Amino acid sequence: MRKIVWFGVFGMVFSSLTPSLQAQDYSRRFTLGLHGGFWKSGLTEHSDIYTVGRQGALFFRYDLREKIGLGFGLSYAKTWEADLSGRWGAGAGFTFSKKDEPNQFAHTWLDLSLFYCFRPWERLNPYIFGGMGMAFWNMKDKDGRFVQVLDRNQNPFDLKDQELTLSGGGGLEYRVRERWGVNLGARLRILTHILTGFKGSKAIVGGGPNELDLPKATLEVFLGIHHYFGKLMDSDKDGVPDRVDFCADTPFGAMVDERGCPLDSDSDGIYDGLDKCPQTPPGTKVDVNGCPLR
């Protein structure tokens, strides 16, 4: 039942925005990105035992409106048991130091998010986002075998699970070229424990001394590259996008300046590009082609 409710929420959000897909003035319709960075699990009761990990992601965003986009991310992340010697029970904190032959904690994250871009037409574009997704994780030993724990009936089972996540964050995109940009951002992901498999005899998750103390949140920082697909809308086909075109009804074929306004070098009333006699002396009466009347 919970799955149906969450999928229904996704559907309503998407359907409410979909009608705006037509006849919009997009700077870029589709963004493809590769991200990489670091992450740290946290909000445990007594088990901060993992290093700062590494993560990489494949990212897509589709512009629904001028400043609103729908994004999807697929991330893979790893961390390891930290070397806690000399820390006197303070936890791993932000360390990269692993213990000898550590267990590995691996995550796969699927994220669906709504983005709000503050300056989508500028070279520097701050943005924020929020959404939900799923986390799939497991713990393996140095030989790649699943670590096992005991359920309430003292039966062993593999330490792995999945759960619904809520996430939010923000960042900056810097457009290096028209179709290429770099992206620096951060994300906080909350692990809700909804849709978990730790139920019944496996309901051993908690903060007590004999319970499985799992992280309740992750924090990540990432840097990546973006490639933008799509074209700026240019209704009069003068090469200047509608968004910055101060003369939106330029006749087809006329030469324009950087503001999209027609040029008329000899001031005869016939625009450059349409003027077949471009050097008419000042004051000369001309025909529709810009040539002197005889």
Image (spheres, rainbow, N blue to C red):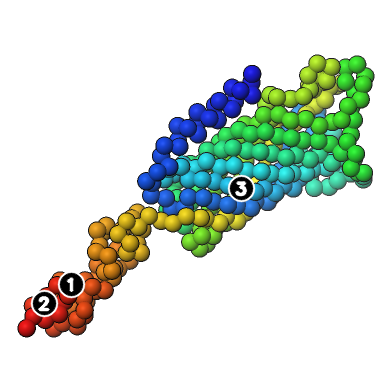
**Residue 84 seen in render:** no
Against 59, residue 89 (above or below) is above
Q: Name the residue under label 2.
A: 286
Q: How crowded is mark 3: few (under 14 residues within 10 Å), some or many (20 or more)?
A: some
Point out residue 97 in the picture as x, y percentages from the top left corner: 83, 47
Q: In the rendered structure, which disc, 3 or 2, sits on the residue that comes first in sequence?
A: 3
Q: Mark 1 points at which residue?
A: 270
Left or right relative to 219: residue 82: right
Instruction: Give the distance between the C-alpha atoms of the residues marked 1 and 3, in whole angstroms.
Output: 49 Å
Left or right relative to 187: residue 135: right
Against 227, residue 165 (above or below) is above
Q: In the rendered structure, which disc, 1 or 2, sits on the residue that comes first in sequence?
A: 1
Verify CB contact (< 8 Å) between mark 1 and mark 3. Answer: no
**Residue 266 seen in render:** yes
Q: Residues within 10 Å of mark 1 (few under 14, many from 20)?
A: many
Residue displayed at 85% across by 33% down? 89
Verify CB contact (< 8 Å) between mark 1 and mark 2. Answer: yes
Residue displayed at 30% across by 59% down? 236
Residue displayed at 61% across by 23% down? 4
Residue displayed at 89% across by 42% down? 144
Q: Nearer the viewer, mark 3 or mark 2?
A: 2
Point out residue 71 in the picture as x, y percentages from the top left corner: 56, 42
Residue type beneath disc 3:
Phe
Which element type, helix, strand or loop, lies under badge 2? loop
291 vs 204, nearest the viewer: 291
Verify CB contact (< 8 Å) between mark 3 and mark 2. Answer: no
Which element type, helix, strand or loop, lies under badge 3? strand
Point out residue 182 in the picture as x, y percentages from the top left corner: 57, 56
